[in-house]
Image (tube, rainbow, N blue to C red):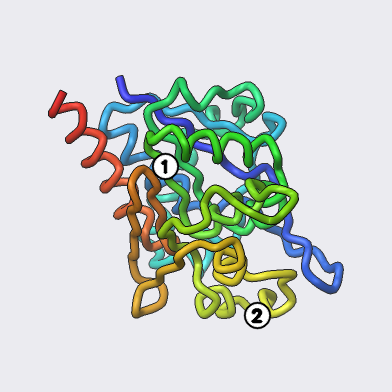
């Protein structure tokens, strides 16, 4: 059975440049849609967070920003169906990435608060990238590669093709104008070959070897389905 490690932020806030705190966490669609796709494919899913803390749902993701009402209702129902799993995540430090066929990081603003500075996550990401086995990061989740940078600021992700939430998309949020940094800018600073779709808030997926990234919440389904197709193709060819 294909095994996937889903690494979710444990943050419940995003601290802004002026010291104010914006309530945050994981984005509903970015957990629910890939989790459902992986489960429907028959994959075994393990959820991990920093410290094994139950992740916090960003309530904005179930409001207007989360899409059409029917979509938000479906996402909320699915999250309810996996409530027990979300309530008991594995501590990230106890998860061995080598035990999993896929490592998947969903976003939300949470990763900007914790995973971007989490050295356990940073070591896992660097090790996974070097392994050549599938690693996927969605929307704000690429912020986590900040923690892979060494003392000289060099990241193993430098030179790799990636996407993530664009500055234009981020600044649709009024509070983002107080952000300490924006994801697109940070990825470029780390030496990533950043790519974004022509139209904001439309699906955009970038694949560079074993590294898979999706630009925004709307990329959740496309990213998950691309992973499933590629993993199944490799298994079939063996």
In this rendering, does residue 45 appear at all? yes
Q: Is residue 61 left or right of residue 136?
A: right
Q: For residue 93, which quarter of the picture?
A: top right
| 148, above or below 22, in the image | above
Residue 22: mark? none
SS label for mark 2: helix
Residue drawn at x 55%, y 48% is: 156
> Could you say where residue 178 lies in the image, as x and y percent from the top left?
74, 76
Q: Tag 2 or tag 1, which sits nearer the N-term?
A: 1
Of residue 177 and residue 238, the one placed in the foreground of this image is 238
Q: Residues within 10 Å of mark 2 (few under 14, many from 20)?
A: few
SS label for mark 1: helix
Q: Is residue 12 visible?
A: no
The residue carrying mark 1 is 78
Identify the image quadrant of the C terminus: top left
Closer to the camera, 197 or 107? 197
Q: Is residue 60 left or right of residue 223?
A: right
Q: Name the residue: 38% across, 38% down.
A: 134
- Which numbered mark, 1 or 2, is in the foreground of this view? 2
Q: Quadrant of residue 21?
A: bottom right
Residue drawn at x 28%, y 27% is: 42
Q: In the rendered image, which residue does mark 2 sit on? A: 174
Left or right placement of residue 110 versus residue 21 in this view: left
């Amino acid at each position: 059975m294909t095994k996937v490690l889903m690494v979710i932020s444990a943050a419940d806030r995003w601290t802004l440049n002026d010291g104010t705190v914006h309530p945050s966490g994981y984005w509903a669609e970015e957990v629910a849609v890939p989790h459902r796709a992986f489960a429907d494919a028959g994959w075994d899913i393990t959820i991990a967070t920093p410290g094994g803390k139950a992740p916090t749902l960003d309530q904005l993701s179930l409001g207007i920003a989360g899409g059409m009402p029917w979509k938000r209702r479906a996402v909320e129902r699915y999250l309810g169906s996996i409530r027990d799993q979300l309530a008991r995540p594995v501590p990230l430090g106890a998860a061995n990435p080598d035990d999993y066929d896929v490592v998947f990081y969903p976003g939300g603003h949470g990763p900007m608060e914790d995973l971007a500075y989490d050295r356990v996550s940073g070591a896992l990401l660097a090790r996974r990238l070097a392994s050549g086995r599938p690693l996927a990061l969605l929307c704000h989740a690429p912020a986590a590669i900040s923690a892979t940078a060494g003392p000289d600021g060099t990241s193993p992700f430098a030179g790799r093709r990636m996407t993530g939430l664009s500055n234009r998309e981020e600044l649709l949020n009024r509070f983002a104008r107080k952000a300490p940094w924006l994801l697109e800018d940070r990825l470029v600073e780390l030496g990533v070959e950043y790519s974004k779709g022509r139209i904001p808030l439309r699906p955009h997926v970038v694949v560079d070897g074993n590294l898979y990234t999706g630009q925004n919440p709307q990329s959740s389904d496309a990213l998950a389905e691309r992973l499933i197709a590629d993993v199944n193709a490799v298994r079939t060819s063996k």
